[in-house]
Image (cartoon, rainbow, N blue to C red):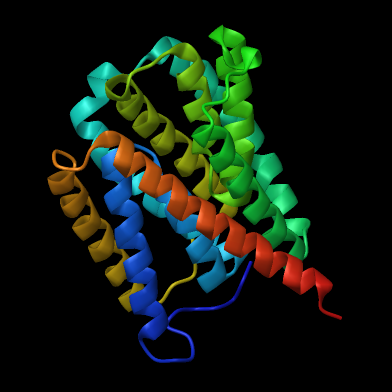
Amino acid sequence: MSERLLPVTGGWAPGLLLGGIVLLGACVQWLTGMGFALVAVPALVLLLGPAEGVVLANCAAGAVSLVGLAAGWRRVRLEAMVPLCVAAVCTVPAGTWVARRLPEPWLMACLGALVTAAVVLVMHGTRVAALRGGAGSVTAGAFGGFMNSAAGVGGPPLSLFALNAGWSVREFVPNAQFYGVVVNTVSVASNGMPRLSPPVWGLAVAAMAAGALIGRQLAGHVPEKRGRLLVLLLALAGGASTLGKGLWGLWRP
């Protein structure tokens, strides 16, 4: 794991940039139910490096999901979510193992490719027979747990499972938050806590709170389709940037 402690060289600029990323991620999480990782992970990886960026995303996404779940836990579909989360927990260590052994350029390229592919699948509303029913929940959970601990982006498999199950947005959001709490908690336990200086931790927490408040206010005013499209486009741009940086690192002598 990286030994960097923010703020790094450049004064407070990196810390302020991190705060802006976390604020944006928390805001879109409240708008869509699972936007934090897709939007924030590529930017956090570029700022902090793969190891620190992923574990900070795990921490923040788990915290935002926990706050959101407080109001919607009664709508969680335990019959679908329990096997899904159990499968995810089982594959989290595998994701951690892979992430710790890949050289940074390879890891950056893989993270970018995973984010980009996941966004494209979700944008196209891909229907997959293997993601239906009880077996589908286990399959989605297994892929989601691995992706969450390795890349910080475990939501797309759940999104595809919900799509194939015909869930509405109202049904999806509390279940996504339940999944986010469980899987991100286990991912943080597996990957460890990010190494940030106390002032930057404070800034990140404040940014999460501000993003949640802004997202809550915007939720009733931003059309669902437009908000979702904006999140996916931001995620696609971030994934492509991370992939490009990884490929550049592999190409350089």
Relative vertical location of residue 166 with respect to residue 117 in this rendering, above or below: above
In the image, taking residue 43 as reference, residue 224 lies left or right, namely: left
Tell me which residue sits at (71%, 53%) in the image. 110
Q: Is residue 8 left or right of residue 87?
A: left
Q: Which quarter of the figure has residue 251?
A: bottom right
Task: Name which residue lies at 87% across and 81% down.
Answer: 253
Q: Quick one: which residue is furthest to the bottom in this view?
A: 10
Residue 82 spot, x, y in % from top left: 47, 18
Which quarter of the rendering shows the N terminus?
bottom right
Q: Write down the quadrant of residue 229 in the picture.
A: top left
* Residue sitting at x 27%, y 57%: 208
> Would residue 58 be visible to someone looking at this image?
no
Give the quadrant of residue 219: top left
Q: Residue at x 64, y 54 (%)?
A: 111
Q: Nearer the viewer, residue 39 or 154?
A: 39
Query: Residue 175 at x, y = what percent?
Result: 36, 25
Report if residue 132 is visible in the image. yes
Which residue is at the front of the view, 253 or 94?
253
